Image (cartoon, helix red, strand yellow):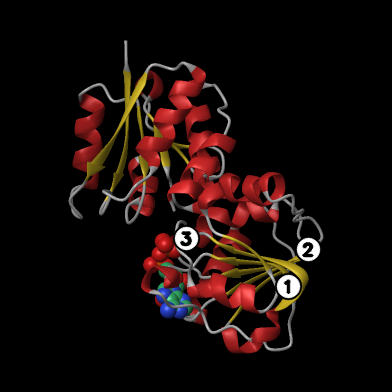
Amino acid sequence: MTDHYAVVGNPVAHSMSPAIHAEFARQTGQDIDYMRLLAPLDGFAACIADFRARGGKGVNVTLPFKHEAWNFVTAHAGYALNAGAVNTIDFRDGKIIGYNTDGIGLVRDIKENLQCAIQDKRVLLLGAGGATYGVMEPLLREHPEQLVVANRTVQKAVALVGHFEKLQNFSINGVLATPYHELRQSKFDIVINATSAGLNDEMPSLPSGIFAPGALAYDMVYGKHTPFIKFAAEYGAKISDGTGMLSEQAAESFFVWRGVRPDTAPVIALLKREA
Ligand code: ATR
C-alpha cells in the first residue's frame, strides 16, 4: 500500500521536495507518494491535522511554519529540540514527532559533497532567523575554531547566541554575535549565508576582505546566482549554493520516515541541471 507524505508551506508551489522524494522512492523501491500542501497562513495546524487524519505518514515543513511546527509536535527528536524549529514530522505509532534535518543537510553537503572540513575552521554565519537556529547545533558539533553570527539587527544575533548558551544539554564555546560593520578586521575560512537577502537580490553588507585564502562561501538559497555568491566569486572564494543542502536534508527526512538512506548524488546533479 502506498504511504502518503507532503511538504507544507506558504508559498509551496516552487518546492522541489516532491521531485526529490520521487527520485529517492524510485531509487530505493519504496512505495510512497509525496505532494505539496498549501496551508493558509493562519491554518497550519488544521492542515497538518487533516492530512494526518486522512492517513498521511509524515510531512516536511517549510517557510513560514517551521517554528509553529515545533510547537505543534508532541515530541522533539534529534536537533529539533534545541533548534526551536521543525522541518520534518513523523506520524509513526500514533505520535507526532518533530525533527530538524536542515543542519545535518548543511554539514553533510559542506563536509562530504564539497570536501571541506569544518573542524578548527573560522566560520561566519550570516543571519539570525529560523534558518540560522536550524543549523547552529550541527555546525557547533563539528568543533569549528570559532563561530561568529552576524546580523543586520544585532539584537537578534545576541538573542540567538543567548538561546544556545542557556541550553542545559549543550555547551557552546567561541561563539560570538556581531553587527556586520565589526567584521572589517576579520577573515573566515567558511562563510555561510543563512539570510533571506538573496531572495530579494540583496546581500548583507560584508567587507571585501572577509574571505581567508581558499575560503568557502555557501549560500543556503538554491537555484539562484545571489549577490552574495557573485561577491564571493569576485573576491576569490570557492562558492556553493544550497542545492546540496536541500538534497541532503531531504535524504535525512527520507531516512527518518523509511529507515533507508537514498543516494543524493543523482538528485543534486538533476537539480543543478535544471537550475
Ligand atoms: P528565515 O526563517 O529564513 O531565517 P527570517 O526569520 O525572516 O527568515 O530571517 C531572515 C534573516 O535574513 C534575518 O537574519 C534578516 O536580518 P534582520 O534580522 O536584520 O531582519 C536577514 N535579512 C533579510 N534581508 C536582508 C538584507 N537585505 N540584508 C541583510 N540581512 C537580511
Cα–Cα gap, marks 1 and 2: 8 Å
Ligand 1 quadrant assignment: bottom left
Mark 3 secondary-structure assignment: loop
- The image position of residue 53, as x and y in percent, is 21, 25
Mark 1 secondary-structure assignment: strand
Query: Which residue, given by chain and number where applicable, does mark 1 sit on?
Result: 188
Of marks 1 and 3, which one's residue comes earlier in the chain?
1
Give the mark toward the camera: 1 or 3. 3
**Contact between labelled residues 2 and 1, with CB atoms less than 8 Å apart:** yes
Category of crowding for the residue at label 2, using alpha-carbon neighbours closer than 10 angstroms: few (below 14), some (14–19), many (at least 20): some
Q: Is mark 3 within 8 Å of ligand 1?
A: no
Q: Using the image, tell me which numbered label, if any, was put on residue 221.
A: 3
153 relative to 218 in the view: left or right: left
Question: Where, quadrant-wise, is the N terminus in this rendering?
Answer: top left
- Tell me the amino acid under the disc marked 1: Phe
Camera-side residue of 245 and 23: 23
Query: Which residue, given by chain and number where applicable, does mark 2 sit on?
Result: 121
Q: Residue at x 51, y 51 (%)?
A: 243
Which residue is most to the right?
Answer: 120
- The image position of residue 112, as x and y in percent, is 70, 44
- Tell me the amino acid under the disc marked 2: Lys
Cα–Cα gap, marks 1 and 3: 20 Å
- Tell me the amino acid under the disc marked 3: Val
Q: Is residue 83 above or below residue 251?
A: below
Mark 2 secondary-structure assignment: loop
Q: Using the image, tell me which numbered label, if any, was put on residue 47.
A: none
